[in-house]
Image (cartoon, rainbow, N blue to C red):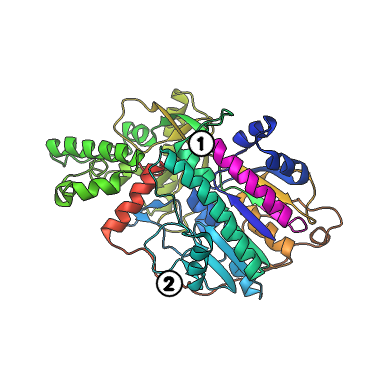
Amino acid sequence: MIVLGLDGATFSLIRPWVEAGALPTFSRLLDESVHGELESTVPEITVPAWPAFATGRDPESFDMYGFTHFNRDTNELDLSHDEFVRGKMWDAIDDQDGRSVVFNIPGSYPWQAIDGAIIAAAPEYKEEYSHPPEKWDELVELVDGYKLRNDKVPGSQAYVDLSLELVDKRFTGFEHFIESEDPDLAVGLIRATDRVAHHYWETEVSDDNALLQVYKRVDERLSEFLDSHDDEDIVIMSDHGFEKVTGKFMPNKVLADDGFIHLTDSGDSTKATLGSLKDYASTALGTVGLLSFARKVVPEDFVNSLPSGDTLSLDNAINLGRIDFDRTKAVCDVGQKTTLVYALSDDESQVDAICDEAEATLRRGATDVGLDVSFKRLERGGPHTPDLAMIIETPEIHASSRLDTDSALIDVDTSGHARDGVFFARGPSFRTGSVEGAHITDVAPTILHTLGYEIPELTSGDVLDVFEPGSEPATRSPSYYDFTGSDAVTGGGLSGDEEGEDEVKDRLRELGYLE
């Protein structure tokens, strides 16, 4: 069984480009597979979506809600890169004496040792990038300089060229480990479909459309890949979709206007102005990839002496400098189309009351600016789990945590994640046609069942109705067992120094995950 992830791949691009004749392999997939939209997690971002894919569990169970996520115990933002999530599908396969290859999957690090091979995805600052460690040298030698990420300037032709090169290297590397390791399960990911969509959103069919160039390169390599594994079961999926973004809604402003959020009066006005300019400069520099260069030519002590607009709560309410948490009842963190509401109380009855009031306020604020929203109550899985999620159902509108706006809805011209990704299943076990209501947590139990492995009882997803009548998986019911797993083998991790964390955050800001 092979699972190929296409990060951020979306039917909003694939279907019209197939109809235009630009993607012949995807056209073939639509004919030869069972396929449909794949609903993402809350929120619909890389983390927690890929860990949910890997485990078949909702984010509450592993308490992870973004590359950074709010910690209600400390009132700070935590980086999530080094948090181990147990019970991934390849861990369950290893537990049942099977063998796996895991290639470039976000959230695969830190890993639990398995029989097979793991090549980690970004972020960097690790001592080891693979398990076993020698697999990294094997990969780098194979593809003549494998890279975890595109380090060229976004917006440049060099960025596009390297994106296309990395598509080729990812396919080549993944195919190599499938052949050399002979796994029961191979899981790999192509990232460029997401990265280029963040920087070069364009829907027209033209030779100079960078995003279409990436999809065409994937389409070409996918044709070879399908031919090489014609008699095998293959799942192709994405963690979320993508869309044009024309407006951003300001939930923290709405809550602040209704008295949920209170600010202190701390901060020198001159430094506040400089801090705001610092943030605007960081945003501009980040857009063209010059933040690391700027740090080399501007004295670090001067830059660090300035409070950022974030710190003073000019831009981002979660970045803490002026929020009076003693008087604040709730605060919002955001992830693309999802607003995460944290009630600042440990009393269950108070939490319920705060969530009810916050939902009414946010619903009223959204309605006032013409937005359609839905709400979901969440059970606290840990200090990072929000109590309430507001999902913007209106197309092309995302959320922002900013407070420094006059309006609850501002115009923007960008792109970002959509709720629904893509799902294709092709091979002897799968029927053709459509599948409805698929969720990203359904992928892991479906794969384990297809392979004949037992499914961890902790799994919250379901086995999808995608099997060819009379095929072996269609003839039996899913089997579950009490998987506990062992400790992670980390092999290093983030360096822990502030410079390393700053660079990680800069790249997240460049992609629009941080403001």
* Circle 1 Cα neighbour tier, 10 Å, few/some/many (<14 / 14–19 / ≥20): many
User: Does the stretch in magenta take in 234?
Assistant: yes
Look at 56% across and 30% down and name the residue there.
Answer: 203
Q: Is residue 255 above or below residue 501?
A: above
Considering the image in quadrants, where does the C terminus appear? top left
Q: Which labelled disc corresponds to residue 210?
A: 1
Look at 74% across and 61% down and name the residue there. 450
Q: Quadrant of residue 82?
A: bottom left
Query: Do the numbered discs 1 and 2 sit on residues whose CB atoms are within 8 Å?
Result: no
In the shown orientation, is residue 265 left or right of residue 136?
left
Label 1 vs label 2: CA separation? 37 Å
- Does residue 339 appear anywhere in the picture? no
- Per the rendered image, the range of residues in magenta is 211-235
Q: Position of residue 247 (x, y in %)?
A: 44, 28
In the image, what residue type sits under mark 2? Gly
Q: Is residue 323 left or right of residue 221?
A: left
Question: What secondary structure is marked by label 2?
Answer: loop
Q: Amino acid at mark 1?
A: Ala
Horizontally, is 429 left or right of 251 in the view?
Answer: right
Q: Residue at x 18, y 51 (%)?
A: 300
Chain-order first, disc 1 or disc 2: 1
Residue 401 on image: x %, y %: 36, 38
Q: Which residue is mark 2?
A: 491
